[in-house]
Amino acid sequence: MASAILSSLLHPSEVLALVQYKLSPKVKHDYSSDKTKERLYYFLNMTSRSFAAVIQDLDEELKDAICIFYLVLRGLDTIEDDMTIDLDVKIPYLKTFDEIIYQKGWTFTKNGPNEKDRQLLVEFDTVIESFLQLKPAYQSIIADITKRMGNGMAHYATAGIHVETIADYDEYCHYVAGLVGLGLSEMFSACGFESPMVAKRKDLSNSMGLFLQKTNIIRDYLEDLHDNRRFWPKEIWGQYAGKLEDLVKPENKEEALKCLGHMITNAMGHIKDVLEYLSLIKNKSCFKFCAIPQVMAIATLNLLHTNYTVFTRENVKIRKGETVWLMKESNNIDTVAAIFRLYARQINNKSNPLDPHFVDIGIICGEIEQICVSNYPGSTAELRRIQAGVMAGTGGSVLTAAAVVAGAVVLKSTLA
């Protein structure tokens, strides 16, 4: 907490969000009365802290189902991602995982010892036991998405991931993330929290997944390169380098930044769909669950835009204070639209006029502004409120002073 406050000192809205988070009573999720469920949420927290938080804030009707959905797909991914498993062993599991989740007592011990999530599969009978207790409608949705994703993974495992064109890029992101969006939308509609239209708009659900996945792929360029994985499409990077790895060479810095701008432009093309999807979500817990990852993504793209450290340092992430502030603010469509407007403006302002995609990014940012003003008029007042906090750090305002004092108090108690 101390380091997070220090890194956010010039951002008073973040300091206040951190202080509020530190001082607010924490919701304790006690599953001790149900050992199976306790183990289930242990694995959720073990495999993803970020998703664990938003999943456990869902209404009870959906919380367990989406937790199990996540763990089933995590189990599938743990088999697919393990390069120590021979393909003749791996492929049948990928293609039949949707049937395996109905087999009581099934576990898997063939992962390599260094596979970080191997214990989930060693105890996968716990996930299956919980899956079989779900309503048939949820089981059917989870099994369908698992089958489609498993077959997609089997295809790429056999043929190799060759992301040559933007169409290849979109197809890969659909299999690993877009399908998740489709499954979640079907669950929201099946439980009655959302209208049938949410599940029917598959194009919007797919874009929700693609926007997140493409942001991660852009951010993880160097990490994936070191792991010998190539997800940036050649149709884009081939315009700026002979080989994808050439972008890390200092002499190619200018071309690398142009390529980065091109990738960000491509990802931002999904934002209009994201905003339209979020406007359909009426249940408060479902809205926060969907909105928080999306605002994190636009904040991350803002951090990455024109940022050469993408090519020099792994694990480029937004500040913890910014994360906490975004989680606190993502309560309704007007505020979320205001957040998108804020970051779109920052991205546009950082754009280099010499970048070949300077105009394209400007057009997308302008469209975001226009859509939000027309469809979410309340976002204008929310944007003013947000900007008052975000910009306060440069003006010596009362908010700045309050944030610094509050941060100092928390720092003192943290370091005591």
Image: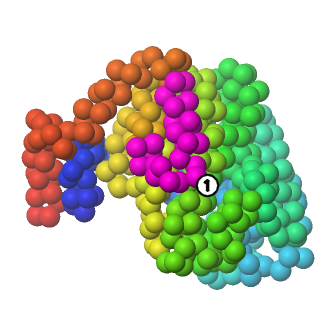
**Residue segment shown in magenta:** 347-371
**x%, y% of residue 2?**
22, 60
User: Which residue occupies 56% across, 36% down?
Assistant: 363
Asked whether 352 falls inside the magenta stretch, the response is yes
Q: Quadrant location of the C terminus?
A: bottom left
Q: In the displayed structure, would residue 187 be above or below residue 312?
A: above
Q: Give residue 4's quadrant in the image.
A: bottom left
Asked whether 203 falls inside the magenta stretch, the response is no
Q: Residues within 10 Å of mark 1 (few under 14, many from 20)?
A: many
Can the viewer see residue 281 in this picture?
no
Way the structure is coloured: rainbow
Looking at the image, the residue that sits furthest to the front is: 354
- The foreground one among 143 and 270 is 270
User: Which residue occupies 69% across, 75% down?
Assistant: 243
Secondary structure mostly seen in the magenta stretch = helix
**x%, y% of residue 129?**
71, 52
**x%, y% of residue 119?**
62, 71
Q: Which residue is mark 1?
A: 263
- The foreground one among 87 and 42 is 87
Q: In the displayed structure, would residue 410 be above or below residue 415?
A: above
Can the viewer see residue 45 in this picture?
yes
Q: What is the tally of numbered marks visible in this picture? A: 1
User: Which residue occupies 80% across, 66% down?
Assistant: 162
Taking 130 as reference, is 258 left or right?
Answer: left
User: In the rendered structure, which amino acid carries the disc numbered 1?
Assistant: Met
User: Which residue occupies 25% across, 62% down?
Assistant: 3
Q: In the displayed structure, would residue 292 be above or below residue 3?
A: above
Which SS class for mark 1? helix
